[in-house]
Image (cartoon, rainbow, N blue to C red):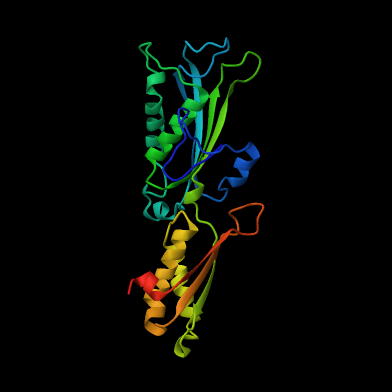
Amino acid sequence: MASLPPGHIPRATSAAQPPLLLTHEAAARWPATADTVSLSSLHLVARAGRDVWGRTSRAQPLAISATVAMRARFASAAAGDALDASTVHYGHLSKNILAALADASAADGSQTWLGGVDVASRVSEAVVRTAAAGAVEGVRLDVAFPKASTLGDGAGCEWTVLNERLKKQMCLVSVWVDRVADEAVDGYDEVEDIVLKAVENTDFETLEALAEKVAYDLFNLFISGQSPGSNLRLRIEKPTAVPLADAPAIEIYRTQSQVLRV
């Protein structure tokens, strides 16, 4: 299983691949509550994997199953009774998967040989291309070669890709307004609203960038108008980011001139 940065799908030829996880680690990180689109046993004949005799020179049956976990719910597609960016068109998905493997399944005998990881990598890319930008939270694939085993039901590989850095995660935000004006002391409800909107409406990859955004909004929308002589201390924690630690965190201290350039 690969955990990847946004927009990157690992390829068998990549020099620097994302770290691999064990099967149970991948299962634990799979977005179990996400809405999913599944495609079961898409059959084709391709020069892929090794056949029952260990050969790579001949085409053999191949079956691909895919489960795509979507980042958003299907609510908008359901409300409009029409496919939109919250889901994936499974007809287009099937066609794009077949197209991604076309050079290995050509009927004229000019097939390119692909290993199981090559197949999974290409199919992963086809899934992401089919969906709207940033819409996929995870892809789970089963690449099966049903005739590749003499005594068993077949052979193959399983492949899971997670766009973990695109997934929303819980953050704990603590705010201290230093030397707050008397008339602004009770403005914590307004501060809370500003922080919530800043955090919920952004998609930063780092806590550092998020902290600067929250600081800017607080100075721009609250401090500069109600307590212009105040400075700000801001701490953001991410309690679920590191399994064996309580919570990684960053903390910054900013003045109005540093943030608003005034």
Q: Where is residue 57 drawn, in percent x and y?
A: 47, 10
Q: Is residue 199 above or below residue 92?
A: below
Q: Position of residue 65 (x, y in %)?
A: 51, 32
Closest to the observer, 183 or 161? 183
The residue that appears at 60% across and 38% down in the rendered structure is 21
Which quarter shows the C terminus? Answer: bottom left
Task: Where is residue 15? Give x, y as percent.
Answer: 46, 31
Task: Work out which residue is located at the far bottom of the displayed protein and give it.
Answer: 182
Seen from the viewer's position, the closer of residues 250 and 51 is 250
Taking 97 as reference, is 149 above or below it? above
226 above or below 18?
A: below
253 left or right, relative to 259 = right
Specify the quadrant of the image occupied by residue 142: top right
Q: Nearer the viewer, residue 17 or 155?
A: 17
| Picture coordinates of residue 53, whole percent (x, y) | 57, 9
The residue drawn where x is 46% and y is 64% is 211
Horizontally, is 122 left or right of 238 in the view?
Answer: left
Front residue of 109/254: it is 254
Report the label total.
0
Determine whether 206 is above or below 180 in the image: above
Q: Is residue 191 left or right of residue 152?
A: left
The N terminus sits in image quarter: top right
Measuring 65% from the left and 18% from the top, which residue is drawn there? 152
Q: Is residue 42 visible?
A: no
Look at the image and tell me whether residue 134 can be seen.
yes
